[in-house]
Amino acid sequence: MRIALAQLNATVGDLAGNARRAAEAHAKAAALSADVIVFPELFLNGYPPEDLVLKPAFQDATRAELERLATACAEGPAILMGTIWRKDGKVYNAVALLDRGRIEAITAKAELPNYGVFDEKRVFASGPMPGPLNVRGVRIGVPICEDIWTPEAVETLAETGAEIIISPNGSPFDWHKPDTRMNIAVARVTESGLPLAYLNQVGGQDELVFDGASFVLNGDRSLAVQLPAWREALVVTEWQHTPSGWRCQSGEVAKLSDGSAAAYDACVLGLRDYVDKNAFPGVVLGLSGGIDSALVAAIAVDALGPDRVHAVMLPSKFTSDDSLQDAAECAKALGIRYDKVSIEPAVAGLTWSLKDLFAGTNSDITEENLQSRVRGTILMAISNKFGAMLVTTGNKSEMSVGYATLYGDMNGGFNPIKDLYKTEVYALSRWRNEQRPDGAFGPQGIVIPERILTKAPTAELRANQTDQDSLPPYDALDDILVSLVEKEMPVAAVIARGHTLETVKKVERLLYLAEYKRRQAAPGVKISSRNFGRDRRYPITNRFREDVPSEKPEKTASAEPGTRDGARTHPNVAK
């Protein structure tokens, strides 16, 4: 038996386009004498379709497109197509068997994930425990994604006569997901004794990015086939029936990226698909001479090519010569358009307009944030005028503690490094200077000047400012944040890692207070196991603080100035 695995990139809602791509893949599989071709979870609809599933017109259009696809692909291999399926007033996450011009059978997802980024119970009904489908005389079990994360579905399939397990997936990437998937698949093979083909989609969908990396395990748990990550692939696998059951012959075993390489690939693919699937001609960004904007510029060039990236330096009287030189050098290394627009006239105008109202007050964070908001306004004007999407460049450390300005540096339509802590930003920047990822449109060699990697990070909103004036060193800050955000560790346990009570409580307080900013932040690529938004949903109005013994009483949220005005919170909160 020859089974084609179509690791492809669907677009949510593009029913005709996804069906057309499926038909093209079917034709290629037919030319390679495949008996069946398998597509990822909900490929016809794109995954995740979220509340589109609840729209009757979408349900009707899906059924019509599925029937057209069955008719168009009547000759050649059978098709296992991921699709929504409506029956008796309920909608299911399903796989349809299309063969000989008809919809021959439907199997529905039984286990609906309702955690992290998933909330499928809102939109789908749970199907019964699945039985195998008869596909050209072979009994194939088709557990859909979450169905293999617990033993029951595969156990039921084995008990009801399945000979091969094929699992279509829409499994988004995070740092640890590839190893987790493989461990889950090995467990199901060990329990059932059946070979398993794990087919995952590839591509970006809003915050989520799917890495592909599909694979086939034989019944003895040996890896027969490993598809590449981060790109589409159509691979026909060869299967032989042996005395011990079906066995996949050894085929391509692609090497998968990990660590910084995988995270960088995720950022590139996530940005590329967000820009292209939403039909933007390119992107514009503020290039400050700092590490965050330099990394975003490199990601944008690798994703889209230098001709589609426009960098703008927006200097003020506080912008150093080093920043001006570093930004220009970075733009030159990447080969992108680079312009300078001074913010001084606009800042002076706003300051003059407010002079009477602000008379008798001292200059403070308000005046600092006028600069950031002028920059945001100028960049949005450029985006509006020329159509390029504004990408914003704040990292996860900053967004965790509110070290960002609403309607200023937070302006933008998408943020490729939103889920990277500052220390990870540095790691990815160093990696990119040493490596050029496969399929990248950017140049070889150093694209982020060395001085950007070594100088103290600063917002340059006042003289001689550095981030560490207001925040702990980033290695300490990020360790605290990972402990509080990803791991939900008690404050006492975080302190036990070597941090002071005062520092941990300050970071915890800032983390809670910045929730209102994160609700207004641009979407960005999910990299971690717990990103802000889909994974971590905390209330904005929230008085809870852990009760940890302290020599000094902690201030309450209501006693702290400057945390609800949309400004950078760090100077006032630190008082």
Image (cartoon, rainbow, N blue to C red):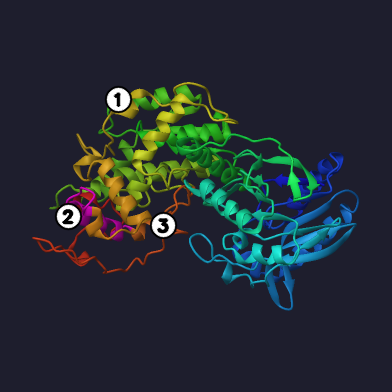
Alpha-carbon span between mark 3 and mark 1: 32 Å
Q: Is residue 513 magenta?
A: yes
- The answer to whether residue 26 of the structure is visible from this angle is yes
SS assignment for the magenta stretch, majority: helix
Q: Which residue is mark 3?
A: 520
State the image coordinates of residue 243 (x, y, percent, origin top left): 78, 50
Tell me the number on the disc at residue 501: 2
State the image coordinates of residue 553 (x, y, percent, origin top left): 11, 64
Nearer-the-camera pick, 89 or 7: 7
Q: Which residue is mark 1?
A: 322
Q: Is residue 62 magenta?
A: no
- At x 76%, y 54%, the residue is 16
Residue type highlighted by circle 2: Leu
**Is 12 positioned to the left or the right of 484 in the image?**
right
State the image coordinates of residue 64 (x, y, percent, origin top left): 81, 63
For the record, the magenta segment spans: 495-514
First in sequence: mark 3 vs mark 1: 1
First in sequence: mark 2 vs mark 3: 2
Q: Residues within 10 Å of mark 1 (few under 14, many from 20)?
A: some
Q: Residue furthest bottom?
A: 88
Residue type highlighted by circle 3: Gln
Nearer-the-camera pick, 350 or 11: 11
Picture layout, residue 322 above or below residue 462:
above
Q: Secondary structure at mark 1?
A: helix
Picture layout, residue 39 above or below residue 293:
below
Picture layout, residue 13 above or below residue 527:
below
- The answer to whether residue 402 of the structure is visible from this angle is no
Are the residues at dot 3 and dot 1 in contact (C-beta closer than 8 Å)? Answer: no
State the image coordinates of residue 459 (x, y, percent, origin top left): 29, 39
